[in-house]
Image (cartoon, coloured by chain):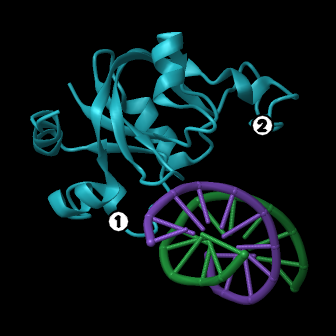
Chain colours: A cyan, B green, C purple
Amino acid sequence: MSYWLIKSEPSDYSIDDLKQEKTAIWDGVRNYQARNFLRQMQPEDIAFFYHSNVKPPGIVGLARIIETQIADPTQFDSQSPYYDPKVTPEKPRWQTVKVEFVEKFAQPISLPQLKQMFTAQELAVVKKGNRLSVMSVPPEVAQRLLTLPK
DNA sequence: GCCAACGTTGGC
DNA sequence: GCCAACGTTGGC
């Protein structure tokens, strides 16, 4: 069982959207490092849901991975901004996962708080200039996050 | 709105 | 295969 952090701009897709829809295919990731993390995910893994580009940015809730190795449908869709003309249905390039809403924190954990708690080594999202939208979270870091008073 | 970080593209 | 130019992300 592994832990992850998935980043989204709430104006694009928020924890409230996931709460309402209950599940979502995490589509649109077009970065190889992020995709490689998506490929490593297993059912039952937990993802920290992070809101970027808001004040303050931070972790706002939890999601569970419920289905893995899904070919991102948007790569085949010529109308999608995530369309990839280089792929074919036989040779997809972008795999992703389906996630399920777990909880929205009453008290989000803001980026300034995360920076106080963790080094960039422990939690990559606190590293200056980090633009990766999917990253892994070490188990001990995840435990510290999960035991915070909410 | 600014700009640092950094991934991608394309000329050579 | 190098690397400059360019585009995007995302904190501030």
Q: Residue at x 33, y 15 (%)?
A: A43
What element does badge 2 sit on? loop
Both labels 2 and 1 in a single chain: yes
In-image side of A8 versus A61 (left or right)? right
Q: Residue A15, labelled with which disc? A: none
Going by the numbered disc 2, the residue's amino acid type is: Asp
Looking at the picture, tell me which residue is in the foreground, A150 or C4. Answer: A150
Q: Residue A84, labelled with which disc? A: 2
Residue A48 in view of the camera: no
In-image side of A63 versus A83 (left or right)? left
Looking at the picture, tell me which residue is in the foreground, A10 or A125. Answer: A10
**Residue A25 placement (x, y as % from top left):** 55, 19
Q: Earlier in the sequence, mark 2 or mark 1?
A: 2
Residue A42 in view of the camera: yes
**Residue A68 placement (x, y as % from top left):** 44, 18
Q: How many marks?
A: 2
Going by the numbered disc 1, the residue's amino acid type is: Lys
Q: Quadrant of residue A56?
A: bottom left
Q: Give me the C-alpha separation between circle 2 and circle 1.
A: 30 Å
Q: Residue at x 28, y 23 (%)?
A: A45
Q: Chain of mark 1?
A: A
Vertical side of A21 occupied by A93: above or below = below
**Residue A120 placement (x, y as % from top left):** 26, 64
Vertical side of A100 occupied by A114: above or below = below
Give the foreground label among 2 and 1: 1
Q: Which residue is mark 1?
A: A127
